Image (spheres, rainbow, N blue to C red):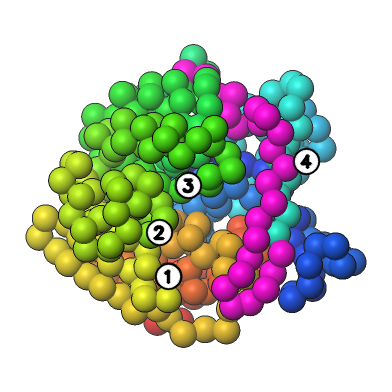
Amino acid sequence: MYDLITIGRSGVDIYPLQTGVGLAHVETFGKFLGGSPTNVSVAAARHGLRAAVITAVGADPFGEFVRQAIRGFGVDDSFVATVDGPPTPVTFCEIFPPDDFPLYFYRGEHPPDLRLTAESLDLAAIREAKLFWFTGTGLSKEPSRAAHAAALAARTSGWTVFDLDHRPMLWESPEASQEAVRQALPYANVAVGNLDEVENAVGTRDPEAAAQALLDAGMRVAIVKMGPHGVLARSKDEYAVVEPVKIDVVNGIGAGDAFGGAVCLGLLSGWTLERTVRFANAAGAFVAARLACADAMPTTDEVLALL
C-alpha cells in the first residue's frame, strides 16, 4: 500500500542559471524534473513517505530523463506510461526575485500526461492509497478528465486532496475550468489553492469566505494560500493563520509543491491543522530560497531546522 499517489503533469523544467535576466538574454540553463503533482510525490518521499505518481511521458530522451529522475528521488514510477507521438513537455521560466517568475509551457495541443485513460489505471492501488492527490489541470482535457473521474470514483476512504492548481493558458475557457473544478469538488475531502485558484473554484478570493465555501462543498480541510499574507486553513473544528517564513527568495516556483508534500505528511501523521500548515509553509520557504524544485525538496529535519 502506498502512503500517497499523485496523478497529473510531469516533464522537464529548464531554468536559467542567471537570475534577473529575461529568456532572450539567458546564456546557461539547468535541467530539472518538473510537473507539480510529480514534484509533490518527490516532496513527500523526502519526508519518508512511500509515494508513486501516475503520469505519462513521450517516447523520447526527455521522457527517459523524467523516469530516471522520479526513481532517483525514491518515487515509484510503475504507473508512468510512455506515449508515442507527443513529446515530453518542457517548461521554461524567468527568475526575477522576489516575486516574479513567469512560466512558459511547451506542452503542445495534447501532451502525454493528458492522454492517460481510465483503462490504464490501477484502481486497486488508487483505492488503497492512504492519500490521493489530483490537480485542476488534469481535468482540462480528455481522456485525462475521464481517467480522473474513474480514479476519484474508486476512492472510498482516506484523504483525497484536490490541488486547485489553475493554469488559465491550459484551458479552452475560464468557464470550462470552473465547471470541471466544481464537478470534481464533491469527490475530495481536502482542497488546497491560492487566491486565484479558490476564486476559480468557489467564486470568491476572500480567504475566509473561500475557506467556508470549500467546507460547505464537502471539504474536511480547506487551505488557502495568501501569498505574502501567509496561509489560512480551516476544518470543522480547527482554524489557523500562519505568517510567511522570512527568507531571501531565489525561485518561488517550487514552493507550492514542497508545501503540498508537507501537507501530505501532516495529514497522514494526524497533526493538528496549525502544525501542518506551519510545517508546510516552512517547507515551501526552504525551496523558494533555492533555484531548483524537485532537487531542492527538504527532508523533515531540514524543515524543522528552518522552523
- Residue that badge 4 annotates: 62
Q: Is residue 200 above or below residue 122?
A: below
Q: Is residue 131 visible?
A: no
- The amino acid marked with disc number 2 is Asn
* Nearest to viewer (mark 2 / mark 4): 2
Q: Secondary structure at mark 3?
A: loop
Residue under the point 36% across and 73% down: 230
Q: Earlier in the sequence, mark 4 or mark 3?
A: 4
Tag 2 and tag 3, C-beta contact below 8 Å: no
The residue to which callout 3 is attached is: 166
- Distance, label 2 to label 3, CA atoms, is 9 Å
Depicted 285 relative to depicted 151: above or below: below
User: Which percent across, then down, holds residue 262?
Assistant: 40, 61
Extreme top residue here?
119
- Magenta span main SS: loop
Image quadrant in which you'd find residue 235: bottom left
Q: Are marks 3 and 1 in contact (CB under 8 Å)?
A: no
Say what amino acid the circle numbered 1 marks: Gly
Q: Earlier in the sequence, mark 2 or mark 3?
A: 3
For residue 227, the mark is 1
Dot 4 alpha-carbon crowd within 10 angstroms: few under 14, some 14 to 19, many 20 or more: some
Q: Earlier in the sequence, mark 4 or mark 1?
A: 4
Residue 37 drawn at (x, y percent): 51, 46
Tell which of 6 and 188 is nearer to you.
188
Q: Earlier in the sequence, mark 3 or mark 1?
A: 3
Locate the N terminus by quadrant. Answer: top left
* Image quarter hosting the C terminus: bottom left
